[in-house]
């Protein structure tokens, strides 16, 4: 039976054979998605956090007392392409923790006021931003006619975790409520690093941020877009087609202290190394998933696809127990050690999940279970190019077929894995994460109809006030992710909004690729059943 099924499959394969996907655009979007891995439960992470507090107090030596440097600009380094060579010319502004860990204040004259970028005197190659940046235009479109009013921002107070204001390059924070874990802490940290990276360039701002999983500004609350009430512009980590939330890179790019996930640029290097350890062809020919099933019914459903005595859906599924992991020093949860299967499943958690980028980075074929949410980069992914779509409503069979296809089309499957990890390593490198933040915040500030002021209960914030007073993994990750000094090149260049036809055709292409796979899947099982 299985033998025959395989023969049939080969027949179908000849129809499937490659080429089909070849013409798809490189990065393109659609408005959906995000994923998993989240897995923490509140109680669990709190326990592990306490544990971490005891366990680590590294890197204190980094907080040396260093006087601010003079901000003269090197006249050399004419080409930012060669910035590695000229690294010694870069301005570095070390963290200044000299005033001790509890009375920390922000240094005066913190950011260079008078400094020039190397590339401003030259007309080097324009460095275009990745395509997914164009979704910034779409995300801000709800305010394009009305602008962002102070009232609409204030209205988000009831929902937001914090308000972040930039005035003349100085950051202020007004905290409303504690977020889950250190999500707020590392998000704010990331914003401060942006100020270090582009001193004098981040415009005056007033944003509300919410750090939980779900979008919080339903479109249905606002009726027609041209109605009198301007939607609240609320920043968060994910959105969906029914909400106005503005998506922003999640905290984990600067580290996830509770579960020992390093800052992104370090992790990217680990993942790259991890990929080298095992060629695609040598990996287990199954679909791997490891995560916490308890955050969503669809994850519990997924577990029924695990291999058993009676069924083999080509899935090898494992439960991630973070409490246990933290007790064992996270030895079993190293992401770079999890690139051992030809296929990796991504499935959303309670909403989007930060795990998507780790899964895509593996050189394995990402089997992406139809997502409902999107985050800031996922709309740039194309089915058939960066991932293989898997049905939410028929997961086991869909996974089985995906792995059959991939194991019978090794070159194409391998290329799909590679396309995804290249997307992650290049389009999603930290430089681009900062540039995304920069362009989004700049575009947002242009829409603001008022001049922000320091909110009544806000405090001034800088990297020192955060890093010098923190402990454990938090401190370590902050030190590791500190932006050492101003970027010596300008941000990448934003492309204009998609025109409506282009946008529609991108969305159509995406939908058609998914439908195509669903058809193949159907044929495969029909043929199998006829045997
Ligand atoms: C903070 O400083 C005090 C006194 O200098 C020291 O005893 C304490 O260990 C420090 N705490 C941390 C977390 O560095
Ligand atoms: C920047 O600094 C240079 C040298 O210190 C000075 O000549 C120049 O006038 C300064 N420019 C501004 C805009 O302050
Ligand atoms: C910001 O800079 C402007 C112009 O230099 C100045 O008038 C204003 O008072 C400054 N605002 C704050 C909050 O420092
Ligand atoms: C899935 O099957 C594998 C292999 O039998 C097993 O090791 C693993 O524990 C199973 N996973 C779950 C969640 O039961």
Image: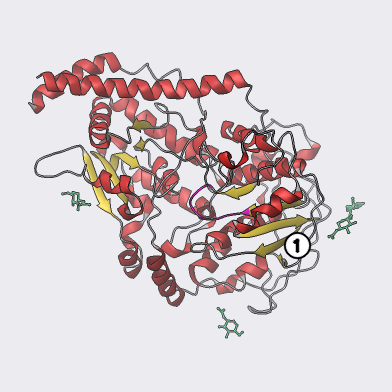
Q: Quadrant location of residue 131?
A: top right
**Dominant secondary structure (helix, strand or loop) of the stretch shown in magenta:** loop
In the image, residue 330 sits, relative to residue 387, either above or below, namely below
Which residue lies under the disc numbered 1?
455
For the C terminus, give its image quadrant.
top left
- The reply to whether the residue tagged 1 has its Cβ within 8 angstroms of ligand 3 is no
Task: Read off the magenta span.
Answer: 209-215
Q: Quadrant of ligand 3?
A: bottom right
Return the x and y of residue 90 as percentages of the image width and height.
71, 52
Question: x%, y% of residue 246?
Answer: 60, 44
399 inside magenta stretch: no
Front residue of 515 and 381: 515
Q: Residue 117 placed where, x, y %?
A: 77, 45
Q: Secondary structure at mark 1?
A: loop
Decide whether residue 214 is among the magenta residues: yes
Q: Quadrant of residue 130?
A: top right
Q: Position of residue 527 (x, y in %)?
A: 16, 18
Q: Foreground residue, 8 or 531?
A: 531
From the viewer's perspective, is 353 left or right of 456?
Answer: left
């Amino acid at each position: 039976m299985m033998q025959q099924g395989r023969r049939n499959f080969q027949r179908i394969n000849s129809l499937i054979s490659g080429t089909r996907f070849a013409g798809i655009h490189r990065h393109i979007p659609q408005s959906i998605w995000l994923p998993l891995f989240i897995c923490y439960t509140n109680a669990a992470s709190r326990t592990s956090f306490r544990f971490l507090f005891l366990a680590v107090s590294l890197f204190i030596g980094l907080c040396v007392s260093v006087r601010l440097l003079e901000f003269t600009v090197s006249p050399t380094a004419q080409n930012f392409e060669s910035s590695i060579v000229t690294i010694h010319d870069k301005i570095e502004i070390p963290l200044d923790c000299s005033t001790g860990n509890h009375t920390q204040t922000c240094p005066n004259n913190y950011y260079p006021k008078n400094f020039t970028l190397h590339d401003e005197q030259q007309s080097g190659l324009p460095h275009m931003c990745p395509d997914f940046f164009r979704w910034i235009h779409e995300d801000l479109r709800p305010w394009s006619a009305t602008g962002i009013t102070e009232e609409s921002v204030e209205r988000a107070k009831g929902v937001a975790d914090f308000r972040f204001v930039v005035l003349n390059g100085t950051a202020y924070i007004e905290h409303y409520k504690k977020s889950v874990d250190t999500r707020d802490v590392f998000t704010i940290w990331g914003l401060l690093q942006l100020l270090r990276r582009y001193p004098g360039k981040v415009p005056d701002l007033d944003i509300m941020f919410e750090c939980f999983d779900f979008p919080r500004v339903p479109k249905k609350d606002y009726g027609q877009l041209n109605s009198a009430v301007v939607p609240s512009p609320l920043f968060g980590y994910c959105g969906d087609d029914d909400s106005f939330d503005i998506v922003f890179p999640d905290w984990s790019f600067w580290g996830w202290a509770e579960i020992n996930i390093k800052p992104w640029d370090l992790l990217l290097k680990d993942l790259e190394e991890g990929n080298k350890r095992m060629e695609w062809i040598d990996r287990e020919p199954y679909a791997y998933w490891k995560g916490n099933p308890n955050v969503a019914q669809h994850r519990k459903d997924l577990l029924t696809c695990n291999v058993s005595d009676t069924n083999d859906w080509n899935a090898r599924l494992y439960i991630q127990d973070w409490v246990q992991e933290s007790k064992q020093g996270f030895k079993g949860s190293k992401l770079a050690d999890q690139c051992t299967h030809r296929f990796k499943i991504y499935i959303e958690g309670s909403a989007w999940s930060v795990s998507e980028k780790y899964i895509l980075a593996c050189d394995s074929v990402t089997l992406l279970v139809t997502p409902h949410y999107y985050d800031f980069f996922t709309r740039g992914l194309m089915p058939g190019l960066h991932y293989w779509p898997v049905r939410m409503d028929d997961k086991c069979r869909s996974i089985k077929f995906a792995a059959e296809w991939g194991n019978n089309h090794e070159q194409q499957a391998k290329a799909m894995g590679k396309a995804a990890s290249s997307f992650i390593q290049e389009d999603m490198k930290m430089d681009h994460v900062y540039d995304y933040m920069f362009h989004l915040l700049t575009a947002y500030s242009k829409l603001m109809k008022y001049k922000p002021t320091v909110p009544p209960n806000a405090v001034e914030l800088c990297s020192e006030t955060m890093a010098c007073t923190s402990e454990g993994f938090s401190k370590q990750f902050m030190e590791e992710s500190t932006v050492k000094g101003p970027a010596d090149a300008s941000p990448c260049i934003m492309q204009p909004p998609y025109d409506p036809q282009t946008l529609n055709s991108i969305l159509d292409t995406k939908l058609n690729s998914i439908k195509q796979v669903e058809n193949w899947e159907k044929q495969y099982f029909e043929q199998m059943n006829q045997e």
